[in-house]
Image: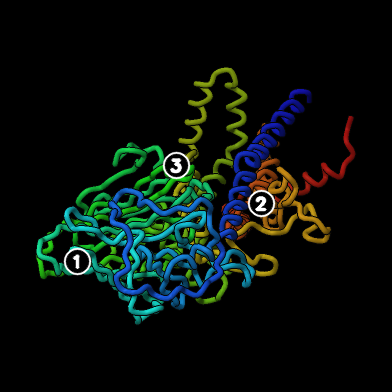
């Protein structure tokens, strides 16, 4: 008994170490990152202001052009402006579509003010709209820029150039044309149109009214000042993203980009891809992205750069540079590029991929390594959502379909387990007989397997085959925006957020918030669905005989408790899936065991458990 007590103490200590380690290294930092992200989003909430009137013709900025692949210098003031002040400080053209609103900055011709009409910070319909792009001068500028560079072309439009607009607003079906002319006789026209979702089309034309040829190179970029707060999940990419022709998908986190080699001298680091055709480059968050898209038939140079500015903030930039072209006097050239700035809705992104032929644009959504499983799973989920109008129901139905799909494999697995249980007494006898001779013990066991026609690993393969499928489902539930703020029933108003209830305030009956407790807050947010998941996991473990080894027995006993606390901080949709999957597994295992004539240990194990708890302790 002394040995068993020591093993029990070791098992409990290890279990608590796992639980507390999870809490310290994952759950608490994760909650802090989410809190910081929410604060950062609230600091840039939308308060639209009326645009200033367009400037008079002939106004121009400085003469230093923006160079593709480097961070453009910006007239940063001594203090950070509010969003409202930054928007009011320059002439603007308003943007108004069914999906977005904002404005185009006529100083620099940037698209630097975009907010999403149909997405808000929280489930409260009165909470601020999601702000995607923000102008220079705010705390975290984030914008798209288009333009030209070239030698001996005179002054070119840059971030300080004030363009003349032919309209005061941009709407679907009503493009805006910006115009500016330099002293060498180059006339620049930028026609910007937008659809009813998130795609801008930018046509940049240059007419040479001068007397000498000029060589120009077009560019487009997405620039983000300051490293944003990221969620930090291994299964989710946040940062620089692009598809560069045959080079394929490129994903670089902010931290890794900062570690790249210098590429333009000074304090600029990054990566460059030369002469690639087809694709896009941009910056992605979990649910939102901004990406520039070149002509899919023309070669371009793509780059991701990180530059340390005059302040402590870095600037992250995705840049596309077109091929150089010489413009003769009297000639005109035109380049068409696009900007995606919005929510990564699967149907919308797929539609752009097909409509514009953008190479692998669907990879803007992080489908992961199991793309060939993940995306079809989402399609099935989306089908049931459209059928029943509830993603929670869709999750339950897809889990049932997966169980049906893998039933033959599960049947084979449990049948193999049934044979193993039938020869368990003989296996125990062999281990006892050859306890001091592991070689003979192994030979005797293999002989027993051959005699009874048992493959000891047969039960593992069906489980291993299912792992990619269930990981893909986890990925779908975690990364797709369709799950964000999607309600289930009752208190679950957001399947992408953790269960908001807690057993430590009796699920809201006591007037305090356990999540606000310092350090232990995330640990104390143990809601109804994580508890249900823990109970189903405990029932699933009780389906099989208790392990003879006391350490294994205690580890299995504590495992549901550990997983219950670990999943307390997971999105509710994942926890609901896990609980439902456990319940289906118990039902399926009971059916297969009964069909194979194997005793179901559940009720005996439950009786033993509760009888031990009910009986008085023995000295």
Q: Name the element at disc 1.
A: strand
**Coordinates of residue 518 in the picture (x, y in percent):** 73, 45
Q: Earlier in the sequence, mark 2 or mark 1?
A: 1
List the residue tagged with mark 3.
Answer: 255
Q: Earlier in the sequence, mark 1 or mark 3?
A: 1
Up the image or down, 162 lies above or below 413; here it is below
Say if mark 2 contacts mark 3, CB within 8 Å.
Answer: no
For the residues carrying marks 2 and 3, which lies nearer the camera in this image?
3
List the residue tagged with mark 1.
Answer: 186
Label 2 vs label 3: CA separation? 29 Å
Up the image or down, 575 lies above or below 165; here it is above
Q: Nearer the viewer, residue 362 or 5?
A: 362
Q: Is residue 294 left or right of residue 194?
A: left
The crowding category of the residue bearing disc 2, from other C-alpha atoms within 10 Å (few below 14, some 14 to 19, many at least 20), is many
List the residue tagged with mark 2.
Answer: 568
Label 2 vs label 1: CA separation? 62 Å
Quarter of the image holding residue 290? bottom left
Q: Nearer the viewer, residue 55 or 196?
A: 55
For the residues carrying marks 1 and 3, which lies nearer the camera in this image?
1
For the residues carrying marks 2 and 1, which lies nearer the camera in this image?
1
The crowding category of the residue bearing disc 1, from other C-alpha atoms within 10 Å (few below 14, some 14 to 19, many at least 20), is many
**Coordinates of residue 422 in the picture (x, y in percent):** 59, 42
Q: Residue at x 51, y 27 (%)?
A: 444
**Coordinates of residue 261 in the picture (x, y in percent):** 33, 36
Q: Name the element at disc 3.
A: helix
Q: Is residue 437 left or right of residue 556?
A: left
């Amino acid at each position: 008994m002394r040995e068993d007590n020591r093993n029990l103490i070791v098992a409990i200590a290890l279990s608590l170490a796992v639980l507390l380690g999870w809490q310290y290294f994952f759950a608490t930092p994760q909650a802090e990152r989410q809190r910081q992200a929410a604060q950062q989003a609230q600091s840039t909430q939308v308060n639209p202001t009326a645009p200033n009137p367009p400037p008079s013709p002939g106004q121009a900025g400085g003469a230093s052009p923006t160079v593709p692949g480097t961070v453009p210098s910006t007239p940063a003031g001594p203090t950070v402006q509010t969003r409202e002040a930054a928007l009011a400080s320059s002439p603007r053209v308003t943007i108004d579509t069914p999906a977005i609103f904002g404005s185009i900055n006529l100083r620099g011709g940037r698209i630097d003010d975009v907010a999403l009409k149909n997405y808000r910070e929280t489930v409260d319909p009165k909470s601020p709209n999601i702000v995607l792009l923000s102008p220079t001068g705010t705390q975290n500028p984030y914008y798209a820029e288009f333009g030209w560079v070239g030698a001996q072309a005179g002054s070119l439009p840059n971030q300080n150039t004030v363009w003349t607009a032919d309209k005061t607003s941009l709407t679907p079906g009503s493009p805006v044309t910006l115009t500016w002319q330099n002293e060498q006789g180059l006339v620049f026209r930028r026609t910007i149109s937008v659809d009813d979702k998130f795609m801008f089309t930018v046509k940049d034309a240059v007419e040479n009214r001068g007397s000498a040829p000029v060589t120009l190179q077009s560019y487009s970029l997405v620039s983000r000042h300051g490293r944003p707060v990221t969620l930090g999940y291994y299964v989710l990419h946040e940062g620089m993203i692009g598809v560069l022709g045959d080079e394929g998908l490129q994903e670089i986190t902010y931290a890794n980009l900062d570690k790249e080699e210098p590429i333009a001298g000074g304090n600029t680091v990054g990566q460059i891809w030369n002469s690639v055709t087809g694709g896009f480059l941009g910056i992605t968050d979990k649910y939102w992205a901004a990406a520039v898209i070149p002509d899919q038939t023309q070669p371009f140079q793509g780059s991701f750069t990180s530059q340390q500015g005059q302040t402590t903030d870095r600037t992250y930039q995705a840049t596309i540079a077109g091929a150089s072209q010489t413009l003769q006097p009297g000639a005109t050239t035109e380049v068409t590029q696009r900007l995606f700035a919005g929510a990564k809705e699967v149907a919308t992104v797929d539609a752009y991929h097909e409509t514009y032929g953008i190479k692998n644009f669907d990879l803007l959504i992080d489908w992961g390594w199991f793309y060939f499983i993940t995306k079809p799973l989402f399609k099935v989920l989306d089908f049931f959502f459209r059928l029943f109008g509830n993603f929670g129901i869709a999750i339950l139905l897809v889990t049932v379909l997966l169980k049906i799909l893998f039933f033959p494999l599960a049947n084979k697995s449990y049948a193999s387990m049934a044979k193993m249980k039938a020869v368990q007494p003989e296996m125990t006898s062999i281990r006892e007989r050859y306890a001091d001779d592991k070689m003979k013990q192994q030979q005797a066991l293999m002989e027993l397997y051959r005699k009874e026609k048992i493959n000891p690993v047969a039960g593992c393969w069906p489980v291993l085959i299912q792992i990619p499928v269930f990981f893909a489902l986890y990925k779908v539930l975690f990364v797709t925006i369709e799950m964000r703020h999607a309600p289930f029933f009752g208190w679950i108003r957001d399947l992408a957020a953790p269960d908001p209830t807690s057993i430590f305030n009796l699920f809201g009956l006591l007037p305090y918030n356990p999540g606000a407790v310092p350090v232990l807050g995330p640990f104390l947010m143990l809601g109804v669905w994580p508890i249900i998941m823990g109970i189903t996991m405990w029932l699933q473990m009780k389906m099989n005989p208790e392990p003879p080894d006391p350490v294994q027995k205690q580890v299995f006993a504590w495992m549901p408790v550990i997983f219950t606390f670990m999943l307390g901080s997971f999105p509710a949709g994942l926890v609901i899936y896990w609980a439902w999957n456990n319940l289906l597994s118990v039902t399926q295992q009971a059916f297969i065991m009964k069909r194979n004539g194997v005793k179901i240990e559940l009720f005996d194990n439950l009786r033993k458990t509760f009888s031990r708890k009910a009986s008085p302790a023995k000295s």
